[in-house]
Image (spheres, grey):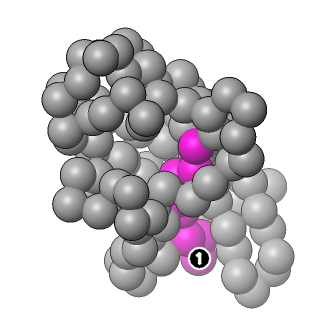
Amino acid sequence: QVQLVESGGGLVQAGGSLRLSCTASGSILSILLMGMGWYRQAPGKQRELVAVITSGGSTNYADSVKDRFTISRGNGKNTVYLQMNSLKPEDTAVYYCNGFVQTTGGNYWGQGTQVTVSS
C-alpha cells in the first residue's frame, strides 16, 4: 500500500506561480516502481490529466499546460513536484496526486489540494 499527501496549493493571481508537492509513503518497492502524476478537477468537470512522470523520468503533459508547468521527481523518488508558472484562471481546480504501479495494477490517490487563480 502507498499513501500520498499533497501540499502547496493556494490562491494566486493570474500570471503567478505555485509549486505543488506530493510525498509518498508505504511500500518502498511500489514507490520505486511507481509512475506519478498530477490530475485536476474543476467544479462541474471531469478529472483530467495534467502531467505524469514515469519511474524512469519520462514526462508527458496535457496540451493546456505545456510550456507552463513542469513535473519533476525528487532524488529519493518518493516525492513529485509540479511547478506551475503563468497561471490562468482556467487552471483553478482541485489538484490530485496519483501514483500507479504498472506491474501490480496499484493505483493510488492523494486527498487533493485546492488551487485558485484569480483574474
Position of the N terminus by quadrant: bottom right
Residue for point 53% across, 23% down: 114
In-front residue for pair 85/32: 85
Asked whether residue 109 appears in the rendered view, the answer is: no
Most common secondary structure along the magenta stretch: strand
The reply to whether the magenta stretch includes residue 29 is no
Number of residues whose C-alpha sits closer than 10 Å to that of mark 1, classed few (under 14), some (14–19) or many (20 or more): some
Is 8 on the left-hand or right-hand side of 113?
Answer: left
Position of the C terminus by quadrant: top left
* Residue on which the image places disc 1: 33
In the image, residue 67 above or below residue 20: below
**Total numbered labels:** 1
In-front residue for pair 50/3: 50
Residue 26 place in picture, x, y as percent:
68, 50
Asked whether residue 103 appears in the rendered view, the answer is: yes
In the image, residue 2 above or below residue 43: below
Residue 77 place in picture, x, y as percent:
42, 62
The range drawn in magenta is 32-40
Is 106 on the left-hand or right-hand side of 102?
Answer: right
Residue 65 place in picture, x, y as percent:
34, 55
Residue for point 50% across, 42% down: 23
Q: Secondary structure at mark 1?
A: helix
Residue 84 place in picture, x, y as percent:
28, 41
Residue for point 55% across, 71% down: 35
- The kind of residue tagged 1 is Leu
